[in-house]
Amino acid sequence: MALARVVLNSGRHLDLTELRFSSTYGGMPDGYPCKPVNELKIKGLLSSADQASPATPVHLVQPAREYPDQYAGAFGPVEMLPPVACVGTFRSTPLDPNLYGSHLTVVWFQSSAWVPSGCDAESGLREVAWEELACDYEL
């Protein structure tokens, strides 16, 4: 049973089968949000998604980045990502009709902790090129 169904801009329906939320900057060590910190956060999310399901490809939806009008510190200017990091596993109909289905794990960021559904998902999530990124699986 799916947690939600997301409709891509292409019209393909995806079933969300697993979803993990985390605070983008929760537990951040001393410092401030900047490009090096953000790249480490993204790398960690991608790595944990890959380790959780090595047979499923992983894709990052490039997050929006904000640069508030503040002075740069030792690590460069302040760079803010949306506050909620999401890792979701999606399943859909197969790419090859001889197989059972297709799947893809997607990492994205959003402004609040809400489950994407229908056409109300973040625009970057709805633009995922499923046919290029997902892979088929058998039972």
Image (cartoon, helix red, strand yellow):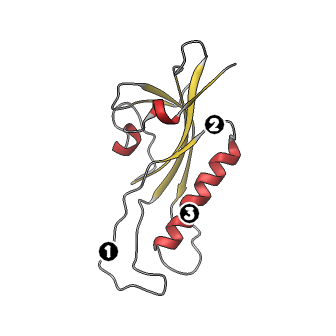
Q: Is residue 33 above or below residue 52?
A: below
- Mark 1 nearby-residue class (10 Å; few <14, some 14–19, many ≥20): few
Q: Is residue 32 above or below residue 92?
A: below
- Mark 2 nearby-residue class (10 Å; few <14, some 14–19, many ≥20): many
Identified at 39% across, 54% down, the residue is 111
Mark nearer the N terminus (3 vs 1):
3
Image coords of residue 88 (percent x, y): 54, 41
Spatial separation of the CA atoms under disc 3 and disc 1: 19 Å
Q: Amino acid at mark 3?
A: Lys
Image coords of residue 98 (percent x, y): 59, 12
Q: Nearer the viewer, residue 76 or 6?
A: 76
Identified at 48% across, 34% down, the residue is 132
Q: Amino acid at mark 1?
A: Pro
Which of discs 3 and 2 lies nearer the camera? The answer is 2
Element at label 3: helix
Identified at 56% across, 26% down, the residue is 102
- Report the disc number at residue 133: none
- Residue 64 found in image quarter: bottom left
Mark nearer the N terminus (3 vs 2):
3
To which residue does mark 3 refer? 41
